[in-house]
Image (spheres, rainbow, N blue to C red):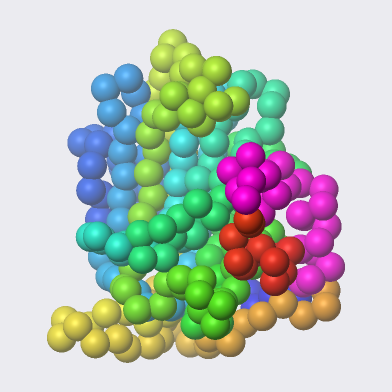
Amino acid sequence: MTTQAPFAIADFYKDAEITWGDQRAKILNGGRDLTLSLDQASGSGFQSKNEYLFGRFDMQLKLVPANSAGTVTTFYLSSQGAGHDEIDFEFLGNSSGSPYTIHTNVFAQGKGNKEQQFQLWFDPTTSFHTYSIVWNPQRIIFLVDNSPIRVFNNQESIGVPYPKSQHMRVYASLWNADDWATQGGRVKTDWTKAPFTANYRNFNILGCPKSSSGSTSCGSSTSSNSNEGWRTHELDAAGRNRLRWVQSKHMVYNYCSDKQRFANAVPAECKRSRFL
């Protein structure tokens, strides 16, 4: 169904750097684990040391448990500057007992507005689960535990911008967004529950890092197994069936179906394929 990335023992000391949050971000267990925390003063975050042009990016996360309303935990790729590209996994917290929402989006040349949201079919707070982005010149595939939940195809042929020329870093963060994250901002963060903590491990990249000269070289940054399946990866019949199941049973928002936002005409890519 999909090309499974091998999990090397991740080394956050070697492959990542904490970028904000003071002591709220901690690398543990000899570099194998990393935690991000959020309190009323600040959240925290980290980024990959390398930038990449295409690849497969895997992260195992255990999300903020219990009442996580108002919090957002992220794992995404982004370039910098005007006209940036970005590929997003954002995990929107919720009140105790309510499901997490996965918010996905794709930006190309500074323009996003391509959101799809899903509610998970498991509790992501009790154990680690794997979240993956496959990004190649043909398509972007979002995966959860190696099951595809979204495919965004390169449709430049009909004028849809696609991220293909800007190197991107991997970013992760935990921050407060109670103005919009949970039920449109109606449920606020309960700071009596702070600090909130999310756990990261098995940071694995198979891709094309940017060299010191600015050129791109392909290979694995964190694994000795040079698994190149991501370069041309597409869904087979089983993968398409799984994608249909996820989108029919667990999708809670699709920008292509938002008639209020796109009253006059839906975006061009929405006319081509329902698997976006």
The residue sitting at the top extreme is 192
Q: Which residues are magenta?
A: 239-264
How many numbered marks have been drawn onto this rendered protein structure? 0
Q: Residue at x 55, y 18 (%)?
A: 186
Q: Residue at x 31, y 73 (%)?
A: 167
Is residue 267 something one can see in this rendering? yes
Q: Is residue 232 above or below residue 166?
A: below
Instruction: In this rendered view, identify the residue nearer to me: 213 or 154.
Output: 154
In the rendered view, does 60 fall on the left or right side of 174?
right
Is residue 223 something one can see in this rendering? no
**Residue 233: % across, % down:** 62, 82
Res. 66 image quadrant: top right
Q: Residue at x 56, y 63 (%)?
A: 132
Res. 157 image quadrant: bottom right
In the rendered view, does 18 fall on the left or right side of 243?
left
The residue sitting at the left extreme is 213
Instruction: In this rendered view, identify the residue nearer to me: 264 or 58.
Output: 264
Res. 163 image quadrant: bottom left
**Residue 24: % across, % down:** 29, 34
Q: Quadrant of the C terminus?
A: bottom right
Q: Residue at x 63, y 56 (%)?
A: 265
Q: Is residue 69 above or below residue 237?
A: above
Whether the magenta-drawn stretch holds residue 3 is answered as: no
Whether the magenta-drawn stretch holds residue 241 is answered as: yes
Q: Quadrant of the N terminus?
A: bottom right
The residue sitting at the front extreme is 264
**Residue 64: % across, % down:** 52, 33
